[in-house]
Image (cartoon, grey):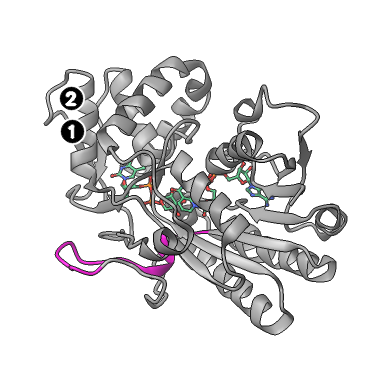
Amino acid sequence: MDRVLVTGGAGFIGSNFVHHLVEHTDATITVLDKMTYAANAEALAGLPADRVRLVVGDIADETVVEPLVAEHDAVVHYAAESHNDNSLDDPSPFIRTNLLGTFTLLEAVRRAGVRFHHVSTDEVYGDLDLDDPKRFTEDTPYNPSSPYSASKAGSDHLVRAWVRSFGVRATISNCSNNYGPWQHVEKFIPRQITNVADGGRPKVYGDGLNVRDWIHTEDHSSAVLAILERGRIGETYLIGADGERSNLEVVRAILRHFGRDEDDIDFVNDRAGHDRRYAIESGKLRAELGWRPTYDDFDAGLAATIEWYLAHDGWWRRAKASTEAAYAAKGQ
Ligand code: NAD
Ligand code: TDX
């Protein structure tokens, strides 16, 4: 795989994967990104110009996608509208990008015979009760809750159908919640770090007992590369690092890091349809491909992420005030 097209490669997770490819392979990389509010050109700064280029374009625009895909050996598909709260305010860009965009890419890889990896989420499986001993596996039935997760579930189904009906050489990964550098301040961990860094209080939805299964984005990238290189065509792999924490546990760890009172928390309006718990069983990925996470200590990874945000306040401040104003208008 000498030439790799990374859709959404200027976003939080896609940009990390581009760095990972540069460091761990000899591939030349094209990033196809619409450069929405969620994109960061800065996250790609400093990469070798003879190996990485950025094409600004829409994955739902076949006039851009068809010729570009045909120039590559593989497509790794990260581009998406990614925030649940935004999907509740206006689902339409989620349907267009996550469904029509994935369809457009699948048609292009089908025609050109190009290998495809689809990056998806554990949210397609719906949620678990807090005391459920089970975790999600590759066999868990689909049961998405939000417009975002329904659009990602639909995109997964399209990929499976294109494998079975047209013989497209594709794999799918469903990963749990990512944290790390360059995540937009609309998301939970960056929002709370930046609130507390500014002397404010974390804003926790509902009772704060909802559980997410956190993985560092570096570990997500190493898993996707392992699947791209060694995964079996047509297979789905769940990616997770055994990082279950309640939202309250996470904000208390952030408050402790700043030497603040652990109860210095604002409980705000809950998210509509808020999933209670996600949890990933990643045994298939580990057994088949020998993958292991390197960030196996969530508290250490979180501390490093907090320090990263403190060192990059010029970047996140550009989006902070408008993001907070939009949340405040919803009582969140
Ligand atoms: P992000 O919102 O940070 O980045 C998305 C990127 O896609 C942005 O650079 C944006 O400009 C680009 N994009 C959006 N619409 C586009 C379009 N129509 N054409 C081309 N580019 C477009 O998202 P993220 O958190 O980095 O997530 C990346 C992928 O990983 C998504 O597919 C998401 O569903 C999946 N995922 C995310 C998480 C998580 O915790 N964030 C967990 C599991 C899976
Ligand atoms: O201010 C907040 N307060 C709060 O309590 C925000 C923004 C969120 N929350 C809660 C909601 C969730 O229980 O924190 C948890 C995490 O919220 P998000 O960061 O919005 O993530 P989530 O909805 O779990 O989805 C994330 O993981 C799966 C990504 O945004 C998705 O792209 C990915 O598919």
What residue appears at the point 43 percent right and 38 percent down from the top-left corner? 186
Quick one: 4 or 100, which is closer to the camera?
4
| Residue 237 is at least partly visible in this image | yes
Amino acid found under the numbered disc labelled 1: Arg
The magenta stretch is 120-134
What amino acid type should be assigned to the residue bearing mark 2? Arg
**Apparent side of residue 218 relative to residue 281 in the rendered image (left or right):** right
- Gap in angstroms between the C-alphas marked 2 and 1: 6 Å
Instruction: Name the residue tied to disc 2.
Output: 256
Residue shown at 42%/22% (left/top)?
308
Q: Quadrant of residue 257?
A: top left
Q: For this view, does 167 lie left or right of residue 124?
A: right
The image quadrant that residue 41 belongs to is top right
Q: How many marks?
A: 2
Whether label 2 lies within 8 Å of ligand 2 gets the answer no
Q: Is residue 150 above or below residue 194?
A: below
Magenta stretch: includes residue 121: yes
Q: Secondary structure at mark 2?
A: helix
Q: How many other residues sit within 10 Å of disc 1, few (<14), some (14-19) or many (≥20)?
A: some
Few, some or many residues within 10 Å of mark 2 (<14, 14–19, 20+): few
Q: Magenta-highlighted stretch: main secondary structure?
A: loop
Q: Is mark 1 within 8 Å of ligand 2?
A: no
Whether 264 is drawn above or below 239: the answer is above
Q: Which mark is residue 252?
A: 1
Point out residue 192 in the picture as x, y percentages from the top left corner: 31, 32
Please report contact status of discs 2 and 1: CB closer than 8 Å, yes or no: yes
* 124 inside magenta stretch: yes
Residue farthest bottom in this picture: 165
User: How far across and down, in percent of the image, does residue 322 sit?
Assistant: 48, 30
